[in-house]
Image (cartoon, rainbow, N blue to C red):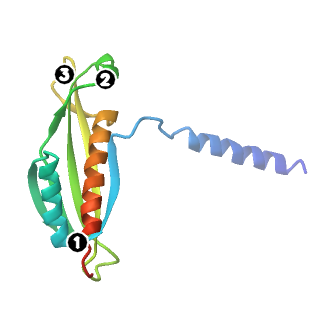
């Protein structure tokens, strides 16, 4: 009985030691899955919805397993909380990526949206990763809902 106590305390100590390295910082990237579609529909519908929501396409890139669309930076006003932290400017961008579904068989692609936010602090000229604020997240959620609705309404045979 007493031989097991040091083993249990060692395991408990290792558990706490392993959990101590976990960060509690906010996420600086927002990712969400939009749905499945064909590559043609991804390209046409994404650009249509991006234009509707006033996001401008910066570049489109064909990758081996699909395609990505990257928007130009959108500049947003800092919230009061961000101003208190010393952030004077905020910008963010959206990256839409379509990756072939199911190991490369068929015409189905999974569409994912990735949003990255950057901030510039007072007295510093460098852009650094910052957590995405509520205003940006709400605008992105409206865009994603619109894109998801369009892709679901435009179902093609895979």
Q: Quadrant of the C terminus?
A: bottom left
- Residue at the spot x=38%, y=40% of the render? 27
Q: Residue 139: in sight, yes or no?
A: yes
Mark 1 = which residue? 65
Disc 3/disc 2 C-alpha distance (Å): 15 Å
**Which sits in the foreground, 114 or 129?**
114
Q: Nearer the viewer, mark 1 or mark 2?
A: 2
Label 2 crowd (10 A; few <14 / some 14-19 / many >=20): some
Q: Residue at x 27, y 67 (%)?
A: 153
Residue at 75% in and 43% down: 9
The residue at which mark 2 appears reads as 82
Question: Could you classify mark 1 by the number of other residues whose Cα lies within 10 Å: few (under 14), some (14-19), or many (20 or more)?
Answer: few
Name the side, left or right, on which 139 lies relative to 63: right
Q: Residue at x 9, y 55 (%)?
A: 59
User: Can you tell which mark lies on residue 124?
Assistant: 3
Dot 1 or dot 3: first in sequence order is 1
Residue at mark 1 to residue at mark 2: CA–CA distance:
38 Å
Residue 85 placement: quadrant: top left
In the picture, the disc for residue 51 is none
Q: CA distance from mark 1 to mark 3?
A: 39 Å
Answer above or below: position of 108 versus 28.
below
Count of numbered marks = 3
Position of 131 with respect to 9 (left or right) is left
- Where does residue 114 sit, x and y in percent of width and height? 28, 51
* Sequence-first disc among 1 and 2: 1
Q: Secondary structure at mark 3?
A: loop
């Amino acid at each position: 009985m007493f031989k097991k106590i040091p083993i249990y305390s060692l395991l408990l100590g290792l558990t706490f030691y392993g959990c101590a390295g976990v960060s509690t910082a906010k996420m600086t990237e927002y990712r969400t899955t939009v749905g499945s579609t064909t590559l043609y529909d991804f390209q046409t519908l994404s650009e249509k919805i991006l234009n509707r929501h006033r996001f401008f396409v910066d570049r489109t890139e064909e990758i081996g397993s699909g395609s990505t669309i990257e928007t130009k930076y959108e500049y947003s006003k800092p919230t009061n909380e961000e101003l208190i932290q010393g952030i004077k400017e905020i910008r963010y961008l959206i990256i839409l990526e379509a990756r072939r579904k199911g190991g490369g068989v068929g015409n189905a692609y999974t569409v994912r949206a990735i949003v990255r936010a950057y901030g510039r602090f007072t007295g510093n000229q460098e852009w650094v990763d910052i957590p995405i604020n509520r205003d940006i997240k709400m605008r992105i959620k409206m865009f994603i809902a619109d894109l998801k609705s369009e892709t679901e309404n435009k179902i093609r045979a895979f």
